[in-house]
Image: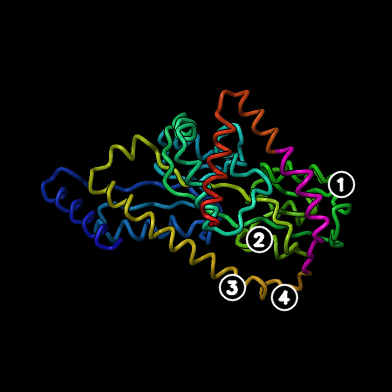
């Protein structure tokens, strides 16, 4: 990795010396605040500045450039060059990627999530799908399986979910609906206010987001093993801006991605090392569901929602079955 970065930097500096390239600064649209979820983008900025000796930099903005539901719109018109988005926030914008948000896929680790994501990202249909937004997929933001925090009396069985208002998007929202819950698609930035005000009873997030968006601060309980799925939130770049980069800058960007992802994984490891302590300090009760309840949940949600997704996407002239099969093959390979 390091020799490649040094080589990319040398190429960029050589071009600068001949006057054929100028310093480049890209605007990056994120939301919330710096956290594990954005650690790879932050690291990417650091690596790029280092490898190009300041000739290619990223101006990272947390809000201000775009709402987190409209980042693809900004990418499409070139309002900024890089952005992170979540497919579940707007299923119709990137329908191919929503296959990764189907419930109960059997993903156990972030490494497996990366393998499944990259298989879908590299599929021709996904590339065409993102092309409608003038977007090129740069790297994933693999997220752990979600679990929920809630206020009031703990929901200990699936029967307790009847009428429960839960913040859950995409396939997870559909999954909760199969057991009587009422899903809400409020954004991550709105989740704390929704939970605190009683607009929702529960919020489905990965641990880092419960910390970052402070839902854990008002939580009375947390599910340890529900694991209904996760959301998929890639980092994309404006295709025109990417293709217009000088060769050295583009090489530096591509070379920095693997190291940025390694940093991302390390940041998540830190969170999980302390998560139990956080729950204890805040007095949050841990709720563990029975194997019987989990089996019922999967039976009601997994196959029917998958079949519905395939039928709907096929009707939209997308190769839905092939996308699903490609994803599952990559997941099986990663688990071997």
Sequence-wise, the earlier of marks 3 and 2 is 2
Q: How far apart are marks 3 and 1 (CA)?
A: 34 Å
Q: Do the residues labelled 3 and 2 touch (CB within 8 Å)?
A: no
From the image, state whether disc 3 or disc 4 is nearer to you. Answer: 3
Tell me the number on the disc at residue 103: none
Is 135 left, or right, of 222 in this rendering? left
**Residue under circle 3?**
273
Whether the magenta-drawn stretch holds residue 297 is answered as: yes
Tell me the number on the disc at residue 163: 1
For the N terminus, which image quadrant? bottom left
* Vertical side of 208 occupied by 28: above or below: above
Q: Distance between the residues labelled 2 and 1?
A: 22 Å
> Residue 310: x percent and y percent?
64, 32
**Residue under circle 4?**
280
Sequence-wise, the earlier of marks 3 and 1 is 1
Region rendered in magenta: 286-305
- Asked whether residue 62 appears in the rendered view, the answer is yes
Q: Distance between the residues labelled 1 and 4?
A: 28 Å
Work out whether residue 62 or residue 48 is closer to the camera in this orientation and state it.
Answer: 48
């Amino acid at each position: 990795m390091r020799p490649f970065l040094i080589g990319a930097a040398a190429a960029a500096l050589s071009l600068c010396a001949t006057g054929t390239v100028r310093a480049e600064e890209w605007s990056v649209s994120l939301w919330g605040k710096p956290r594990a979820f954005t650690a790879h983008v932050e690291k990417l900025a650091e690596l790029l500045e280092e490898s190009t000796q300041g000739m290619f930099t990223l101006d990272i903005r947390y809000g201000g450039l775009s709402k987190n539901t409209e980042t693809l719109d900004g990418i499409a018109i070139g309002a900024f060059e890089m952005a992170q988005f979540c497919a579940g926030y707007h299923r119709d914008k990137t329908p191919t990627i929503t296959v990764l948000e189907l419930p109960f896929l059997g993903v156990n680790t972030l490494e497996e999530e990366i393998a499944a994501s990259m298989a879908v990202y590299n599929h021709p249909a996904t590339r065409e799908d993102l092309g409608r937004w003038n977007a090129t997929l740069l790297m994933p933001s693999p997220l752990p399986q979600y679990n929920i925090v809630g206020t009031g009396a703990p929901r200990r069985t699936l029967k307790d979910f009847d009428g429960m208002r839960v913040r859950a998007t995409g396939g997870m929202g559909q999954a909760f609906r199969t057991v009587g819950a009422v899903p809400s698609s409020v954004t991550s930035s709105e989740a704390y206010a929704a939970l605190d005000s009683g607009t929702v009873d529960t919020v489905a997030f990965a641990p880092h987001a419960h910390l970052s968006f402070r839902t854990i601060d008002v939580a009375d309980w947390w599910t340890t093993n529900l694991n209904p799925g996760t959301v998929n939130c890639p980092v994309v770049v404006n295709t025109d801006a990417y293709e217009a980069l000088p060769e050295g800058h583009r090489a530096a960007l591509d070379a920095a991605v693997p190291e940025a992802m390694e940093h991302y994984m390390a940041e998540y490891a830190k969170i999980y090392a302390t998560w139990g302590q956080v729950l204890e300090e805040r007095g949050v009760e841990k709720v563990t569901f029975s194997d019987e309840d989990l089996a019922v949940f999967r039976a009601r949600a997994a196959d029917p929602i998958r079949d519905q997704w395939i039928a709907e996407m096929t009707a939209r002239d997308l190769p839905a079955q092939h996308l699903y099969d490609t994803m599952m093959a990559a997941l099986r390979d990663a688990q071997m």
